[in-house]
Amino acid sequence: MKTTVYADVLFCVNFIVDYVMLLSVKRLTSLTVRRRRLVAGALVGGIGSFAVLLPPAPFAVSLMISISEAMLITAAAFLPMSVKGYLRTSLLLFAVSFTYCGMMSAILALASPKGLTVKNNCVYIGISPFALIALTLMCYLALRLFDRLRAKGVKGSKCRVIVSNRGKTVEASGIADTGSTLREPFSGELVIVGSNRLFSDLSGFGSYPEGDCGTHTNLRMVPYSSVGGKGLLPAFRPEEVIIISGGKRISVRAYLALSSGNDLSDGCDAIVPAELIMKGS
């Protein structure tokens, strides 16, 4: 049975699907990226979906098209990053996309629903906008549930935090906290909260009164809100941050905020966002 393919529906469906897949990759890798970059990547994916209009191609050709599309989408959404990180992220996006295409092919083979076409590893679904929105929300909720289950295994776990900056290195005990979602306002990067007593020598600006940025360009004031109230924490981005958890060494990009508290949590000297540890899990 032939299916009439409408270009506008094809583009909109794949734009939304690619956006959800990019959200999945972002959550799985804990990459810091602005929403407009994900939209840009989804736009590239929406344009790439027009491959479904091409004549049927051999599997090897379709595979190469899919890999090339994943690399273009990754470039639009996540660059700049290291070559290794770019290849790893592209392969992850390809794997997510290939899994999705395989699921749609299975549905097509078993149920033969009207309006579903899979060709050249591209998917066309002729469904109503309401059904499309509902399915997209279901996919995103499933993703969040999966993410919460991953975080549950990390929550409260002990780790070691190694911070290097200005030719100095400090190693401290840390604890993973799923409730720690502090981000540096301008870059959006996650923030580790560490003891001022241990880490102040690495910062280069020492200990400043709350709200005083001094003259150091590497200093950021990070707003926080807790049961005890609201305020600002002085923070800086170290040259290198390594988290050792479960026998794994995880290199991350993050800011380090300095707290004057002597005991941050459970005898540890650093509170680490669980999302940073999940990056290496």
Image (cartoon, rainbow, N blue to C red):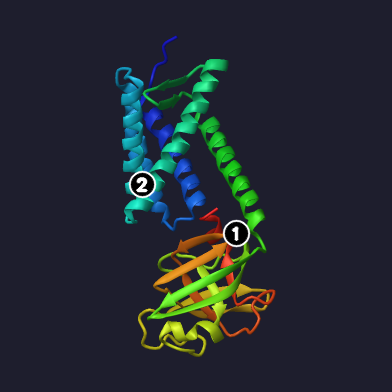
Residue 121 or residue 281, whichever sits in front: 281
Q: Is residue 221 above or below residue 10?
A: below
Residue 123 or residue 72, whichever sits in front: 72
Give the residue type at disc 2: Leu
Q: Secondary structure at mark 2?
A: helix
Q: Secondary structure at mark 1?
A: loop
Residue matched to label 1: 246
Specify whether residue 17 is in view: no
Q: Label 2 neighbourhood size at 10 Å, few (<14), some (14-19), many (20+)? A: some
Give the residue type at disc 1: Gly
Q: Are marks 1 and 2 in contact (CB under 8 Å)?
A: no
Q: Is residue 68 above or below residue 270?
A: above
Residue matched to label 2: 87
Identify the residue at horizontal 67%, vertical 64% (top origin).
Answer: 156
Mark 1 vs mark 2, CA separation in Å: 25 Å
Where residue 251 appears, as percent x and y from the top left, is 46, 63
Where residue 79 appears, as percent x and y from the top left, is 33, 53
Image quarter (top left, top right, bottom left or bottom right) of the N terminus: top left
Where residue 65 appears, as percent x and y from the top left, is 32, 31
Where residue 221 appears, as percent x and y from the top left, is 47, 78
Kindly give the residue lying farthest to the top in the view shown: 1
Total residue callouts: 2
Mark 1 against mark 2, which lies toward the viewer? 1
